[in-house]
Image (cartoon, helix red, strand yellow):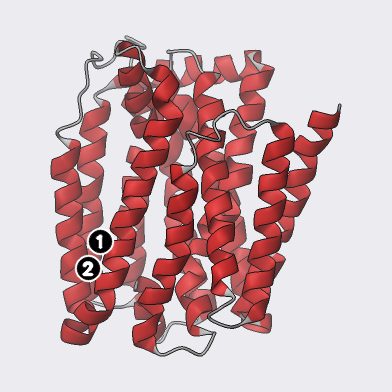
Amino acid sequence: MYALLFSDTGLSVARISSLFAIWSLTGVVLEVPSGAWADAVSRRLLLWLGPLLTAVGFALWVLVPSYWAFAAGFVLWGARGALASGALEALVYEELERAGAVTRYARVMGRARAFGLVAVMSAMGLAGPVFAWGGYPAVGAASVLACLATAVTATRFPEHRVAGEDEGDGWAATLRAGLAEVRRERSLRGAMVLVPVVTAVWGALDEYTPLLVRATGVAEATVPGLLLLIWAGATAGSLLAGRCERLGGRGLAWLLGGAAVALAAGAEARTPAGLVLVALAFGGFQLATVLADVRLQRRIDDTGRATLTSVAGLGTEVATVAVYAGYGALATRTGHATAFAVFAVPYLVTALVPAIRARD
């Protein structure tokens, strides 16, 4: 509900977009160094440290709600995202590889993301009554507790890799080795480009879904329930990752194109019923996101896995900042429905690339 908190504090759409940009810019600055750090030290360490930073940020939001407190919270949240990005995928892939079960990576990550989305949906379902009971302070307190629970859970991850075994000279050497691999492998470069292309736009639009839902004219207390519908679609997309793991270029093109059409049509309907199409679109985009990650992990050798995953994450963050800037300017003039429809267009363009390659 933080987008609503920002709006109710008096922030304009442009200022809210600037906060989202700060969030992504933090990731831009920290993404690659944190990935190299994950390869040089314990990946599990980064996974439990990050949520503690977010907990501090959420506490700031409810204790001193103001633009600068929101900005500080997003810096901390952005740092958490950078610490986890690359470290999580590398830890899971290599632990599965060690267990002789690396072919289950798509299924495991799809289910993991689905469980995460179910947790988000549960929070959305509870947000209405909790907000009605205790307002934003109660929602903020629950968010802080969730971050603490995340940190505790991360300490239980298995990690058999010895810290720094990828590159004995530390994170700088790990970063150099990873970038050298990118220069050598053309297929790896393509997989790294696919990740931000698929992930960035819908990942940025996610932050505006509460405002899109409210723009349909529903009551404030109804917003979490309709957000629940949208994320049910995303959850379904995650669960399909294992079945769709071998989806080829033509299939990926149809997936992205169909999701784009559903997003535009659902947003422009400007009704609660239209959000069903938005949910279908988010399901397609979530599935494509998992599949893009699978393709990337399969093209990375064991050296610098977290580093290279973070380089792809850097591309996502840069593209996301551009979406935030464009959305703030566009939605201020046209409204949220039209802005969502316009940002479906890049996916239609993207769908042409795998379609053409598949034909060739």
Viewer-nearest residue: 180 or 263: 263
Viewer-nearest residue: 216 or 148: 216
Residue 183 percent coordinates (x, y): 64, 18
Taking the view exactly as shown, the residue that stands out farthest to the front is 243
Residue 155 percent coordinates (x, y): 15, 35
Would you say 164 lies left or right of 245 here?
left
Assess disc 1: are there few (<14), some (14-19) or many (≥20) residues with their C-alpha within 10 Å of its C-alpha. Answer: many
**In the rendered view, would you say 176 is above or below 358?**
above
Q: Quadrant of the C terminus?
A: top right
Numbered disc 1: secondary structure: helix
**Any mark on residue 60, and which?**
2
The residue wearing badge 1 is 57
Report the residue at 51% width, 90% height from top. 217
Residue 124 percent coordinates (x, y): 32, 69
Report the residue at 24% width, 72% height from top. 126
Q: Quadrant of the N terminus?
A: bottom left
**In the rendered view, would you say 308 is above or below 70?**
above
Q: Is residue 209 visible?
A: yes
Would you say 201 lies left or right of 22 here?
right
Rounded to the nearest angstrom, the CA distance separating label 2 from label 1 is 5 Å
Assess disc 2: are there few (<14), some (14-19) or many (≥20) residues with their C-alpha within 10 Å of its C-alpha. Answer: some
Residues marked 2 and 1 touching at CB (< 8 Å): yes
Viewer-nearest residue: 143 or 283: 283
Numbered disc 2: secondary structure: helix
Report which quarter residue 90 is drawn in. top left
Report which quarter residue 216 is drawn in. bottom right
Report the residue at 52% width, 20% height from top. 298
**Any mark on residue 125, and which?**
none
Identity, as a three-letter code, of the amino acid under mark 2: Leu
Taking the view exactly as shown, the residue that stands out farthest to the right is 360
